[in-house]
Image (spheres, helix red, strand yellow):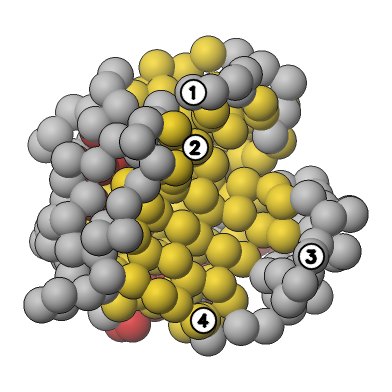
């Protein structure tokens, strides 16, 4: 009987450590069913304004039942937005299926472009990641970008490690770009109907700086989200703790439709 009691105490202690890290209590994530769930910012200019003309970084946790889809399609890992206005404006963050065309099967691609040849950033993972980024498992992603003098460079990190990528860019300024109605859980398309995808998201943060590899390692924190409230350069921080509130000083809150909060969190 004593052994059972001690085991129970150890289990409770372990569960507490899962959700408490560096002062952070993380009990909820936001779940999208892929049917009609979505979370939107008040303005289409919110995300372009936050990534802006200078350095920026995005960090988020995501869990998907089907991370790399079967077939030749692709599956968003944060959002996909397509906006037609004088060109194809886009902000795509996606994973390609196992039979995608060309060299894309099992790869992750991120494209930001305002429809001109002067403002764009595109990167694609060099390797097939389908065996290392598994289904039904929480993964931590960080995209960092250095604006540079005349062109951007970018890095992609997954679970604390930098991923080799091939990239092209001559972009400096996204602050005024019309990238469409960027939304969590949705593939937005102003020239047609929106569609939706299944995912769980937690601890989304945006910075007006290029995070270093040590910063990324600290945020990943061996798989348990860390408290980002005091990190320099924080301009957006959505914790998904029973609301869509932005915990940064900018207060760019999300309006959540359909998506539900769950106690399934990275741990």
Q: Which residue is mark 2?
A: 82
Q: Residues within 10 Å of mark 4 (few under 14, many from 20)?
A: some
Q: Using the rendered view, name the quadrant where residue 109 is placed.
A: bottom right
| Disc 1: which residue | 190
Label 2 close to label 1 by CB (< 8 Å)? yes
Q: Is residue 100 left or right of residue 161?
A: right
Which SS class for mark 1? loop
Q: Position of residue 108 (x, y in %)?
A: 62, 66
Q: In terms of secondary structure, where does tag 3 sit?
A: loop
- Of the two numbered discs 2 and 4 on the same chain, state the one appearing first in sequence: 2
In the rendered image, the vertical position of residue 163 relative to residue 124, given as above or below: below
- Of callouts 1 and 4, the N-terminal one: 4
Q: Quadrant of the N terminus?
A: bottom right
Residue at 35% of width from left, 36% of height from top?
86
Circles 3 and 4, Cβ within 8 Å, touching? The answer is no
User: Along the horizontal axis of the image, is 221 left or right of 249?
Assistant: right
Q: Report, in whole angstroms, how far the alpha carbon at label 3 lies from the one at label 4.
A: 18 Å
Residue 101, label in figure: 3
In the image shown, does 218 or 23 lie closer to the viewer?
A: 218
Of tags 1 and 4, the one toward the viewer is 1
Choose top left, top right, bottom left or bottom right for residue 53. Answer: bottom left
Residue nearest the observer in this picture, 195 or 65: 195
Q: Label 2 to label 4, Cα distance in Å?
A: 23 Å
Under circle 4, the secondary element is strand
Whether 47 is drawn above or below 93: the answer is above
Task: Say which residue appears at 72% left-offset and 28% top-offset.
Answer: 34
Q: Which mark is residue 165?
A: 4
Q: Which residue is depicted at the point 68% across and 34% down?
A: 197
């Amino acid at each position: 009987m004593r052994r059972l009691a001690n085991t129970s105490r150890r289990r409770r202690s372990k569960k507490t450590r899962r959700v408490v890290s560096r002062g952070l209590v993380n009990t909820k994530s936001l779940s999208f069913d892929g049917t009609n769930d979505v979370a939107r910012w008040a303005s289409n200019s919110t995300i372009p304004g936050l990534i802006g003309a200078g350095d920026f970084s995005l960090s988020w946790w995501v869990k998907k039942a089907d991370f790399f889809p079967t077939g030749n399609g692709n599956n968003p890992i944060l959002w996909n937005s397509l906006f037609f206005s004088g060109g194809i404006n886009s902000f795509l963050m996606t994973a390609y299926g196992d039979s995608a065309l060309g060299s894309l099967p099992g790869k992750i691609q991120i494209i930001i472009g305002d429809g001109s040849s002067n403002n764009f950033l595109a990167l694609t993972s060099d390797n097939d990641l389908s065996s290392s980024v598994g289904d039904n498992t929480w993964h931590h992603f960080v995209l960092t970008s250095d604006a540079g003098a005349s062109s951007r460079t970018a890095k992609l990190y997954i679970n604390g490690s930098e991923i080799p990528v091939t990239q092209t860019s001559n972009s400096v300024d996204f602050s005024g770009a019309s990238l469409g109605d960027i939304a969590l859980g949705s593939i937005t398309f102003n020239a047609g109907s929106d569609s939706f995808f299944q995912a769980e998201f937690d601890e989304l943060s945006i910075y007006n700086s290029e995070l270093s590899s040590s910063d990324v390692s600290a945020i990943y924190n061996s798989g348990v989200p860390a408290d980002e409230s005091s990190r320099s350069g924080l301009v957006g921080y959505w914790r998904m703790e029973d609301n869509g509130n932005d915990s940064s000083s900018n207060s760019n809150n999300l309006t959540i439709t359909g998506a539900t909060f769950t106690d399934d969190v990275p741990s």
